[in-house]
Image (cartoon, rainbow, N blue to C red):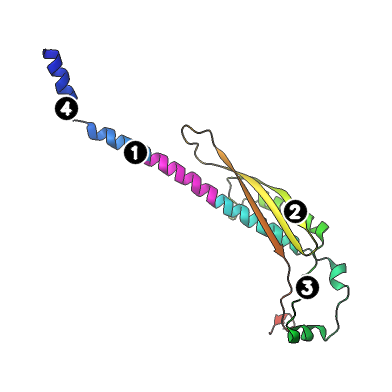
Amino acid sequence: MDVKKIFHTRLSDERGSISVVIIGLFIITLACLMVMTDVATVLVAKRSLAQATEAAAQRGVHSLDKAAYYTGKGTMFTGPLAVATSRESAPIPINCNQAVVEVMLELRNWSNDDGTMKRHELQGIVLTDLECDGTTLEISTYSQVKLPFTLPFSSMDSAILTSTVGTTNQVQEGFYLFGVRLH
């Protein structure tokens, strides 16, 4: 009977019970911080991939198809007539073959760059799709981002990010004098 009383006394003793709660809350807090760090890493890397894709699209769309651009150019009255009639000018033609080269060069620069714009977690930027119809350019890229923490009970240590950008080069209407837009 004495052993039963001692056992009951030990079970009803509450000394040290708060330490179990504190350890549990610490583990939960640590797991939440790890998840938040991984999510923040993915969001920042996604923005870096989007910036790289936008930069590549802008570089590609500035590949002027000179033969198409200078064919059938108007007279000295074409500009003022376009402004007076408020008609929209045609988009600037793109040399699609040169655009592919420019896009690939820009993506290679971003993949090899150690600057502040590119996140070091991005493993490499890969061009997955490029569509060029002569006036618009659309590119799609993907990259793998390495997560800083591998969560317990999970084997996920990286994520795949994608980005798609489309752009066109449009003439800005107005009256230009020595390269300065006056209207």
- Residue 13 is left or right of residue 45, and the answer is left
Residue toward you, 26 or 5: 5
- Residue 104 is left or right of residue 43, and the answer is right
Q: Secondary structure at mark 4?
A: loop
Residue toward you, 174 or 109: 174
| Main secondary structure found in the magenta portion | helix
- Residue 39 is left or right of residue 117, and the answer is left
Which residue occupies 16% across, 26% down? 12
Q: Residue 13 bears which disc, if any?
A: 4
Q: Quadrant of the C terminus?
A: bottom right
Which residue type does callout 1 highlight?
Answer: Phe
Which residue occupies 72% across, 61% down? 59
Which residue occupies 32% across, 35% down? 24
Q: Give the quarter of the image for residue 95.
A: bottom right
Which tag is nearer the camera, tag 3 or tag 4? 3
User: Can residue 135 be seen by looking at this rendering?
Assistant: yes
| Residue span colored magenta | 29-43
Q: Note whether 156 is above or below 87 in the view shown.
A: above
Please name the residue that numbered disc 2 is placed on. Answer: 130
Ranked by sequence position, the earlier of labels 1 and 3 is 1
Q: Secondary structure at mark 1?
A: helix
The answer to whether the residue labelled 2 contacts the one labelled 1, judged by CB atoms less than 8 Å apart, is no
Q: Residue 26 bears which disc, if any?
A: 1
Which tag is nearer the camera, tag 1 or tag 3? 3
Please name the residue that numbered disc 3 is placed on. Answer: 90
Which residue occupies 42% across, 44% down? 33
The answer to whether the residue labelled 3 contacts the one labelled 4, judged by CB atoms less than 8 Å apart, is no
| Disc 1 residue crowd, few under 14, some 14–19, many 20+, Cα 10 Å | few
Which residue type does callout 2 highlight?
Answer: Leu
Q: Residue furthest left?
A: 2
How far, Cα to Cα, is label 2 from label 4? 71 Å
